[in-house]
Image (tube, rainbow, N blue to C red):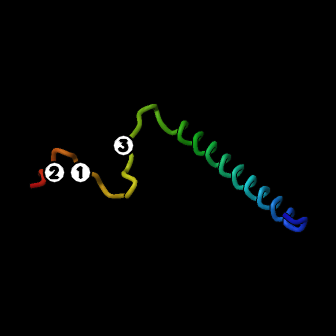
């Protein structure tokens, strides 16, 4: 590596540190919001795809 590249290396590590610290702070703030929200009873979560899930008993078996 030449001497001219070290500035980019330092800048990349600095940017990565800033992004990781910001994300960590976001996660801490989100955790506090979630802990303060409920009474200990969790509500059912929506599926990841956003589509409602059918109950296994309501589906007909495949032929």
Work out whether 5 lies above or below 26.
below
The reply, left or right, for residue 28 in relation to residue 8 is left
**Spot occupied by residue 17 in the image (x, y as percentages of width and height):** 75, 52
Label 3 environment density (alpha carbons within 10 Å; few <14, some 14–19, many ≥20)? few
Label 1 environment density (alpha carbons within 10 Å; few <14, some 14–19, many ≥20)? few
Label 2 environment density (alpha carbons within 10 Å; few <14, some 14–19, many ≥20)? few
- Between 59 and 34, the one lying in front of the other is 59
Depth check, mark 3 against mark 2: the one in front is: 2
- Between 19 and 7, the one lying in front of the other is 7
Q: Earlier in the sequence, mark 2 or mark 1?
A: 1
**Spot occupied by residue 39 in the image (x, y as percentages of width and height):** 46, 32
Badge number at residue 59: 2
- Between 28 and 36, the one lying in front of the other is 28
Return the residue at label 1. Answer: 54
Q: Earlier in the sequence, mark 1 or mark 3?
A: 3
For marks 3 and 2, give the CA distance: 20 Å
Q: Earlier in the sequence, mark 3 or mark 2?
A: 3
Quadrant where the N terminus sits is bottom right
Do residues under tags 2 and 1 come within 8 Å of each other at their CB atoms? yes
* Residue ID at (68%, 46%): 25
The reply, left or right, for residue 12 in relation to residue 56 is right
């Amino acid at each position: 590596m030449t001497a001219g590249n070290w500035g980019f290396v330092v800048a990349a590590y600095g940017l990565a540190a800033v992004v990781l610290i910001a994300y960590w702070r976001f996660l801490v703030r989100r955790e506090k919001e979630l802990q303060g929200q409920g009474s200990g009873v969790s509500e059912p979560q929506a599926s990841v795809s956003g589509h409602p899930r059918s109950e296994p008993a309501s589906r007909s078996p495949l032929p």
